[in-house]
Amino acid sequence: MYYKRPARKSVTSYFLPFLVIGLIFSGVVFGWRSLDNVFIDNKKSTFNEKVFLSIESGSAKAMTVGKSEWQNAPDKIYLYRGEKLKTGSDGRVTLTLFDQSIMRLNTESEVEFSTLKKKNDTYNIDVEVKKGGSWSKVERITNPDSTFSLTTDLLTIDTRGAVFALTHPGTVYVVEGNIQVGIKYDDDVIKTYTVGVGQQLVADKNAISSIKRGDDVDVIFALSDTFKKTNWYRWNIKKDGAISAFEESDFKDDVEVTEADGEETETAVNEEDTEDEIANIGRLVYVTKPASNFETNKSSLTVEGKFDEEKIKAVYVDGKKASDLGDGKWKITSLKLTVEGDNDFKIEAEDLDGIRKKIETLTIIYDKTVPDAPVIDEPVADEGETSVSIEDIEQIIKGTVSKDTQAVIVNDYRLGKYVPGSEEFTYFAKTEYGNLETGENEYKIYAEDKAGNQSEPAILILDLDQKVIDEAGVETENESTTEESADDSESLPAASSSGGVKITAPNGGESFTTSETEFEIEGTVPEGTASVSVNNYKLSLFKSGDAGFKYRAFVSIGNLKIGEKNAYKVKAFDADDKMIGEGSITIDVESGSSAAPVITIPSDSGSYTTSLDTIVIGGTVGKWVTRMYVNDKEIKDYIPGSEKFRSSVTLSAGDNRFVVSAEKAGEQVGKAEITVKFQQ
């Protein structure tokens, strides 16, 4: 029988199955990593969008994207968008962001990197501080499209260059530069403050509720000396490698100011042992009202503040115990101002062991000296006359005041456009405003200083003949205008263009009034333009030889102001830095708006019939309205700037009349009515 010998296998035949398995495994791994990069960890695909972690002391934990548990964070690693970091009770860390900004976290702090984005030369960074304390050092941001923001439950913080500290959720200390702080209510910003170097902002839920109602609430104060003595402050100043922007005496290495036998002495500090004690004094007790160096003409005043009830037992002002109002608030009344000038009040805190420590000195300036009376420069009565006869339906009143003037008042109306410290003022008397009528019109003009002292009045009498009004053909009464518009509603400056510089957008380059808060200013420049500036800011994206330019004016980045006439001057320069052309445009973000309320809910017809005993009345209102009322009862949850209102009302059988009214700066700006018939 013939036997066929099996063919001999080649070496390749032995290894081919293993090669196939290896390729399949590699494909699976590669595919998974590709899916991971695309769908799970796409944020890491951009090399620069990351944060470098350096653990200075103690421990830290991180929660990376896709993970639901905190894990110990090793030193010298990168963190990415969407990831979280927190420090332990002994931990302090330094975070270096991709734009070279520095952020440090104190012990028991937590942050989440909400936005880390880079495109070309534009950076956008938003870090949510969930608890604890942070220190941020942000270099000057020149690109108008770049942003750096921190957020908490109560605040939004934006800056274009500053050094500042944040204590969660509502206290900010500015060491260098300035920041814009937005006060939040239900995640909406209801008011924005600019906080500058040497100031601190303190906000809590009660203060925010008052702000939402339109109340005048003091939230900005001088930077606390106590904060500058804390270990956290001194440690960060050391890390920044510079003495603070304040006096060098504020920074004494390893020295703490204490009090013994009524006198201040200096003793060595053990950082680990004293930080809690300093925190008790510095962070947990402070004055909320009035601010240090507050000026008043009253001989007595009330001081209010807050403290941590778990660590502080009592607060004393000049040896007198303050009243405990509950909820961590204290108050002391009838403090006497005994001398004109500086009056110093010593603030002390008593801890749970009964040990009393000096916090700081509150200085109040008692001023009873009235400023000089204003001087009217235009118009001026003829010699021997007491009044000025005018032959027009409008008259500009101009004059001067002393430099210590804080406000100018004309017939009980405070000039809205007067800038404190300015030595000139302007007031507009117009027939259409209702502040210039037939016959003699008397204007009493006062200067008021910071302490509230009012000068003797300067008196001007304008005599207007009825014939002038008749010839002009104007109505002498206009209920839709107020004296405020007399001061604030001059026409906008016309746009300008010269040397080949032309603004083409927005509004075709013409000045205009709007309620919008974001614009791109665009235009063309002449041949040979090497650089372009807008309001002295050099456009970094403009290249020599470009024919056009673009500049963003946004409320969110601070170069467009709500309620103001924003002027923008565009200048073109040649290679020798010589200006060859310029143009201008003014964008008025409703500086004179007082839009009255309009009822749209439950009907816009002025009447409505229902079988329900409780309904909602709502509608729209001007952006700058500060308070809203229904039948003289304030709408508590109205948010200024929201441009809408809602209020629940209870009905009685038959017709129910409701009057909705709006206030702007304490003056009623309009009202609307609706009659609701309740049929049972």
Image (cartoon, rainbow, N blue to C red):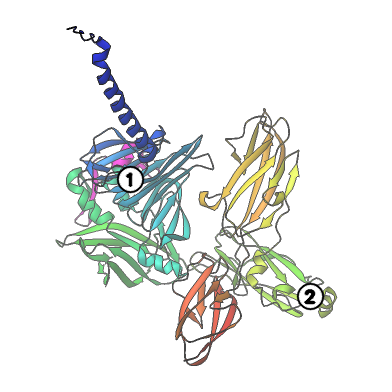
Number of marks in the rendered image? 2
Q: Earlier in the sequence, mark 1 or mark 2?
A: 1
The residue carrying pointer 2 sits among few (fewer than 14), some (14 to 19) or many (20 or more) residues within 10 Å by Cα, namely few
Please tell me which residue lies in front, 274 or 152.
152
The residue identified by callout 1 is 250
Per the rendered image, the range of residues in magenta is 235-262
**Residue 386 appears in the figure:** no
SS under mark 2: loop
Please tell me which residue lies in front, 634 or 122.
122
The residue identified by callout 2 is 474
Quadrant occupied by the N terminus: top left
Decide if residue 372 is on the left or right side of residue 437: left
The residue carrying pointer 1 sits among few (fewer than 14), some (14 to 19) or many (20 or more) residues within 10 Å by Cα, namely some
Which quadrant would residue 440 be assigned to in this image? bottom right
x and y, in percent, of residue 596 in the image: 60, 73
x and y, in percent, of residue 506 in the image: 67, 50
Decide if residue 115 is on the left or right side of residue 460: left
Decide if residue 365 is on the left or right side of residue 523: left
Is residue 236 rendered magenta in the image?
yes
x and y, in percent, of residue 317 in the image: 28, 65
Q: Residue at x 66, y 43 (%)?
A: 522
Decide if residue 622 is on the left or right side of residue 196: right
